[in-house]
Image: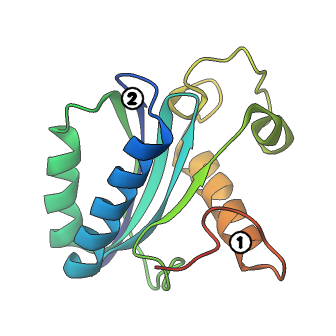
Amino acid sequence: MLSQLIYASQAVHPMNEDELADLLIAARRHNAHAGLSGMLLYANGSFLQILEGEREALDSLYARIVGDSRHTRLRLLSRAPIEHRKFTQWSMGFEALSDTRLTQVLPGFVPATPYPLVNPDLIRNGTVAEVLLDLYQRNSDAPGATTGAAVPV
């Protein structure tokens, strides 16, 4: 059964570009092998990720995510069956968000907000998370898009 899972978490320390690149390379390799697709947002030490695929593969990956020592404050926002994938071309799309961009797209965000993507006052539930992730997916598909997720892999 095709399913979707959305979670948010806080990095145990702010991740630099090399750490994010290593994480993304490993995620893309694993997800391609497991038949998973999705997108990862990173902002100010927090993650928001959507994953799609067969339920068994999602359950296996989520168990690994729960045990991953690189993050804490894990919040499962949504887990549901789906009829079709939204991120068909991406084993893992990625976007590192700036405060300026978050101010434009996330109601209630102010630059002093720590770990915005795991903050329950901003990302209240899976619906809010999915709308935000969908926004980045749609923007990256637009002609001339410059988002980090624009390269489908």
The residue at the point 82 percent across, 36 percent down is 100
Label 2 Cα neighbours within 10 Å, binned few <14 / some 14-19 / many ≥20? many
Q: Residue at x 48, y 84 (%)?
A: 88
Distance from Cα at disc 2 to Cα at disc 1: 25 Å
**Neighbour class for label 1 at 10 Å: few (<14), some, many (≥20)?**
many
Query: x%, y% of residue 33?
Result: 21, 80
Q: Which residue lies furthest to the top in this view?
A: 112
Q: What residue type is labelled 2?
A: Ala
Where residue 121 appears, as percent x and y from the top left, is: 63, 23
Where, by quadrant of the figure, is residue 1 drawn?
bottom left
Relative to 68, residue 28 above or below = below
What's the image's color scheme? rainbow
Please give the label number shown on residue 43: none
Q: Say which residue label 1 marks.
A: 140
Residue corresponding to mark 2? 11
Q: Residue at coordinates 24% horizontally, 65% vertically from top-left?
A: 58
The image quadrant of residue 109 is top right
Q: In this view, does 146 lie to the left or right of 132?
A: right
Left or right side of 149 for 27: left
* Residue at x-position 47% and y-position 81%: 85
Q: Which of 147 and 6 is in front in this view?
A: 147
Vertical position of residue 148 compared to residue 99: above or below: below
Compare residues 113 and 148 and report the one nearer the observer. 148
Where disc 2 sits, the SS reads strand
Q: Which amino acid does label 1 sit on?
A: Ser
Q: Quadrant of residue 115?
A: top right
Percent x, y of residue 130: 58, 56
Instruction: Residue 73: tell me if it is visible.
Output: yes
User: Is residue 1 at least partly visible in the picture?
Assistant: no
Disc 1 on helix, strand or loop? helix
